[in-house]
C-alpha cells in the first residue's frame, strides 16, 4: 500500500501564521499596521462568524498585493522563505524529510498561498490557495477556493485520485484541518516542536 503524508503548514510545520509574517515582510510594519486597522471591521465580523473567513482573507490580500507584478510577488516569496527558515519547526522538517527519504508521497496542504509555501519545501508537492494573475499582475482575487477545511480534502483528492486506496498519515493543529485528519488512517492533531 502506498503511503501519503499530508501536512498542514501554518501552526503545524511553522511557529506562526505565515500570511501575517509574509505581509509584514513584503509590505513593511507601517503599511501592515495601517492595513489591518483599515480592515478591522471586517476582521471583527469574521471573528464573530458574521463574515466568511475566505472573503476577509481575500480582502486583506487584495489590499496589500492587488496590482503587484507577478515577478515581484514571486521574488518576495523566494526571499521570504530564504530569510525566515526560523519559522519552521525542527521536528516538522525532520518528519517531511523522513517521509520523502522512505519514498512516500508527501503533500503540504495549506490555506496559505502556495507560492510562499513552496520555497520552504521545494522538493515537496504543495497544495495551497492559488492566486489569480492577469497580464502579469496580481488581481487580488483567489484562483481557487481558500484551501481550508473540506477544501483541503477536495484538493488532495484532485491531486491524488486514488486517495481512498492509500494509507494517509495527516498532521494538523486547527479546526481547518479537521476534515483532512478525518480521511487519514493515522491522524496527528498537534503541532511539531
Image: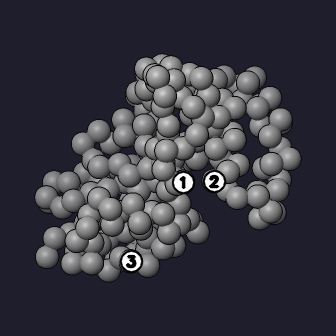
Question: First in sequence: mark 3 or mark 1?
Answer: 1
| Mark 1–mark 2 CB contact (< 8 Å) | yes
Quarter of the image with the N terminus is: bottom left
Q: Badge 2, how many Cα within 10 Å: few under 14, some, many 20+?
A: some
Image coords of residue 126 (percent x, y): 35, 48
Label 2: which secondary element: helix
> What residue does disc 1 label?
146
Image coords of residue 35 (percent x, y): 76, 32
Q: Badge 3, how many Cα within 10 Å: few under 14, some, many 20+?
A: some
Count of numbered tags? 3
Question: First in sequence: mark 1 or mark 2?
Answer: 2
* Residue 22 quadrant: top right
Q: Which mark is residue 95?
A: none
Q: Could you tell me which residue is drawn at 48 percent across and 73 percent down?
A: 179
With respect to residue 49, does 30 lie above or below? above
Question: Visible in this render: residue 56?
Answer: yes
Quote the CA–CA distance across marks 3 and 2.
23 Å
Task: Give the left or right position of residue 164, taking residue 43 as reference.
Answer: left
Q: Badge 1, how many Cα within 10 Å: few under 14, some, many 20+?
A: many
> What residue does disc 3 label?
183
| Mark 3–mark 1 CB contact (< 8 Å) | no
Label 1: which secondary element: loop
Question: First in sequence: mark 3 or mark 2?
Answer: 2
Image coords of residue 71 (percent x, y): 43, 20
Amino acid at each position: 500500500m502506498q503511503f501519503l503524508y499530508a501536512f498542514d503548514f501554518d501552526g503545524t510545520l511553522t511557529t506562526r501564521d505565515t500570511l501575517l509574517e509574509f505581509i509584514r515582510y513584503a509590505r513593511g510594519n507601517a503599511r501592515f499596521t495601517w492595513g489591518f486597522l483599515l480592515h478591522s471591521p471586517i476582521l471583527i465580523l469574521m471573528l464573530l462568524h458574521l463574515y466568511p473567513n475566505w472573503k476577509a482573507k481575500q480582502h486583506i490580500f487584495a489590499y496589500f498585493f492587488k496590482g503587484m507584478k507577478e515577478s515581484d510577488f514571486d521574488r518576495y516569496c523566494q526571499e521570504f522563505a530564504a530569510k525566515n527558515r526560523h519559522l519552521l519547526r525542527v521536528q516538522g522538517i525532520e518528519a517531511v524529510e523522513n517521509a520523502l527519504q522512505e519514498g512516500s508521497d508527501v503533500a503540504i496542504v495549506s490555506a496559505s498561498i502556495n507560492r510562499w509555501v513552496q520555497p520552504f519545501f521545494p522538493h515537496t508537492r504543495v497544495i495551497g490557495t492559488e492566486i489569480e494573475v492577469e497580464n502579469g499582475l496580481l488581481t487580488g482575487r483567489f484562483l481557487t477556493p481558500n484551501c481550508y477545511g473540506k477544501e483541503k480534502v477536495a484538493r488532495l483528492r484532485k491531486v491524488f485520485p486514488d486517495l481512498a486506496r492509500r494509507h494517509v498519515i495527516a498532521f494538523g493543529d486547527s479546526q481547518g484541518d479537521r476534515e483532512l485528519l478525518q480521511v487519514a488512517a493515522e491522524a496527528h492533531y498537534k503541532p511539531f516542536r
